[in-house]
Amino acid sequence: MTRWLKIFPRPRALFWSIAAVILLIDQTTKHWIETHMFIGQSIKVIDHFFYITYLQNEGVAFGFFGHAGNALVGFLAFAILLLGFWWTRDLDWKGREANIIGAMIFAGAVGNLIDRVRIGAVIDFLEFFLHFGPWRYEWPSFNVADSCISSSVIYIIARILTSGWIDSSRQKTKVKHD
């Protein structure tokens, strides 16, 4: 049985503490939005730039596959979960970096999964707009969980491109043969 346990990542208390805080913030903000606003309602925070707007996203990241149905979204979530377990199996969980980034991705995924199971969609509420003369761009709506996942993925890509994080974090012992 211990052989099977070795394939699963073993994050530290830091991981679970950060994940719990992020999950609490994510679910608290979504609960507030759901109980104090109606779907489609928008509150101006910074005119022409930042609004709090209650939306329910039936798709995946940034609304992609919005009309694909729960079966496809469930399959994608399961595939990403398996890929995540495979990727994290050899990370150095003794260090801070893997625990912080892992906790952000884990908590973000769990926070959105809670919404999807509970109401069949993810609650999004952060909306940003950019205006340049007649041109206007609206960034897809998101939430705390989405921002944790996205910022972690950007961090991982930057680390891979600048220092080969994957290779340096995998602690494999090479045996010399004479």
Image (cartoon, rainbow, N blue to C red):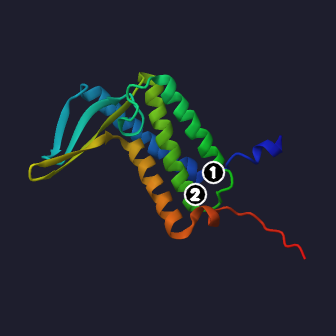
Residue 98's mark?
2
Q: In this view, does 48 lie to the left or right of 79?
A: left
Name the side, left or right, on which 52 lies relative to 7.
Answer: left
Label 2: few (<14), some (14–19) or many (≥20) C-alpha neighbours in 10 Å: some
Q: Where is residue 94 in the image (x, y as percent from the top left)?
A: 65, 60
Q: Which residue is drawn at 13% across and 47% down?
A: 48
Secondary structure beneath label 2: helix
Q: Earlier in the sequence, mark 1 or mark 2?
A: 1
Separation of marks 1 and 2 at Cα, in angstroms: 9 Å
**How far across and how far down the image is residue 81, in percent?**
58, 39
Q: Position of residue 42 (x, y in %)?
A: 19, 34
**Label 1 amino acid?**
Thr
Judging depth in this view, the residue of 140 and 102 nearest the camera is 140
Q: Quadrant of the C terminus?
A: bottom right
Quadrant in which the N terminus is drawn: top right
Where is residue 154, by image quadrant? bottom left
Q: Which of marks 1 and 2 is in front?
A: 1
Residue closest to the eye, 15 or 81: 81
Query: Which residue position is annotated with label 1?
Result: 88
Q: How many marks?
A: 2
